[in-house]
């Protein structure tokens, strides 16, 4: 009898692509899971239990072992910096993290940068030798330069539509982002069989998949 794998699934954008990938990999998530408001979903036929989490909280559930494995964007993984194993680049929810400004931006003496990712942004500007004040926001980041809260922002760009509609320009792309499969360190040892089996299945349906180094 195999042990149940507790999987922290991010609600929202990533779930749609992750559930599709699981299905392609031969893990048939029932369609009603896509629509449910239930937060803990037993899937005994798959040997799994889904925990439907806010994306930013996935690394926390996995670090504490409330979930054995989880799916999370590389952006969140870098920002949260939790003690988890990164097992697989799933190649889904592809986007980039960029520095964005108004077209007439000029470097000033006191620069302010608004972002959902203060740790990643601070590290980037430190490495560039640029002194900036980083302001944490939780959404609608593009508002900040439009209404004078900040000179620039660090945010995700996918299609570029949000930038175009708000008259902003991408100065530089600093990170390519995809979603990753992560694991709790103890679970990875104790439930290695089912975790490895899932990795193998997923690996087969991810084009150019690589197992990232620790
Ligand atoms: N256009 C995009 N904008 C933002 N994130 C994207 C985009 N495309 C893919 N992603 C990826 O999807 C992840 C989750 O995005 P989503 O919008 O579902 O979460 P969120 O904004 O944190 O959630 P919430 O709406 O609950 O605050 C991001 O962490 C990133 O890795
Ligand atoms: O390049 P695009 O395809 O336009 O995608 C990028 C936009 O999508 C995300 O916002 P989201 O919709 O998650 O809303 P939020 O700003 O409230 O986080 C992100 O923060 C950008 O604003």
Image (cartoon, rainbow, N blue to C red):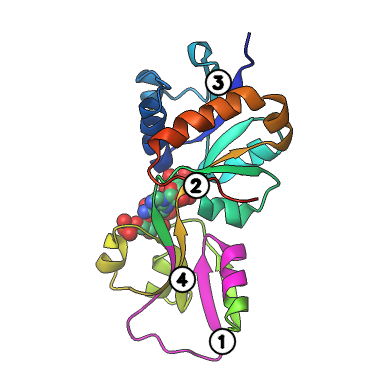
Residue lying at 68% horizontally and 48% vertically, measured from the top left: 82
Residue sitting at x 61%, y 51% = 213
- Residue depicted at 52% across the width and 74% down the height: 113
State the residue position of label 3: 49
Highlighted range, magenta: 97-124
Compare marks 4 and 3 and give the one earlier in the sequence: 3
Label 1 to label 4, Cα distance in Å? 14 Å
Q: Which residue is mark 1?
A: 110
Report if residue 98 lies within the magenta region: yes
Q: Which circle's residue, 1 or 2, is located before the other in the chain?
A: 1
Quick check: 186 above or below 5? Answer: below
Q: Is mark 2 within 8 Å of ligand 1?
A: no
Tell me the residue at 59%/40% (across/down).
182
Quadrant of residue 1 in the image?
top right
Is residue 193 in view from this perspective? yes
Q: Nearer the viewer, mark 1 or mark 2?
A: 2
Q: Earlier in the sequence, mark 4 or mark 2?
A: 4
Tag 2 residue: 210
Gap in Å between the C-alphas at discs 2 and 3? 26 Å
Asked where in the image residue 211 lies, by quadrant, the reply is top right
Which element is circle 3 on? strand
Rendered view: 114 above or below 183: below
Q: Nearer the viewer, residue 46 or 51?
A: 46
Q: Residues within 10 Å of mark 1 (few under 14, many from 20)?
A: few
Of the numbered discs 1 and 4, the one sitting upstream in the chain is 1
Residue that label 4 marks: 153
Residue 112 magenta: yes
Residue 175 image label: none
80, above or below 113, in the image = above
Tell me which numbered mark, 1 or 3, is placed earlier along the sequence.
Answer: 3
Rounded to the nearest angstrom, the CA distance separating label 1 from label 3 is 49 Å
């Amino acid at each position: 009898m195999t042990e149940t794998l507790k999987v922290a699934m991010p609600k929202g954008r990533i779930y749609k692509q992750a559930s599709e990938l699981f299905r392609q990999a031969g893990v048939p998530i029932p369609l009603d899971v896509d629509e449910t408001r239930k937060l803990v979903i037993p899937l005994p036929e798959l040997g799994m239990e889904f925990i439907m989490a806010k994306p930013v909280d996935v690394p926390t559930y996995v670090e504490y072992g409330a979930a054995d494995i989880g799916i999370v964007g590389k952006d969140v993984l870098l920002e949260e910096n939790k003690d988890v194993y990164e097992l697989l680049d799933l190649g889904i929810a592809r986007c980039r993290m960029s520095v964005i400004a108004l077209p007439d931006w000029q470097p000033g003496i006191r620069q302010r940068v608004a972002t959902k990712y203060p740790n990643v942004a601070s590290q980037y500007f430190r490495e560039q030798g640029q002194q900036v004040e980083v302001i944490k926001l939780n959404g609608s980041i593009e508002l900040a330069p439009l209404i004078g809260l900040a000179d620039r922002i660090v945010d995700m760009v996918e299609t570029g539509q949000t930038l175009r509609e708000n008259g902003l320009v991408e100065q530089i792309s600093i990170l390519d982002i995809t979603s990753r499969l992560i694991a709790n360190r103890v679970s990875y040892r104790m439930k290695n069989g089912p975790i490895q089996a899932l990795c193998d299945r997923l690996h087969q349906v991810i084009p150019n998949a690589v197992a990232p180094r620790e």
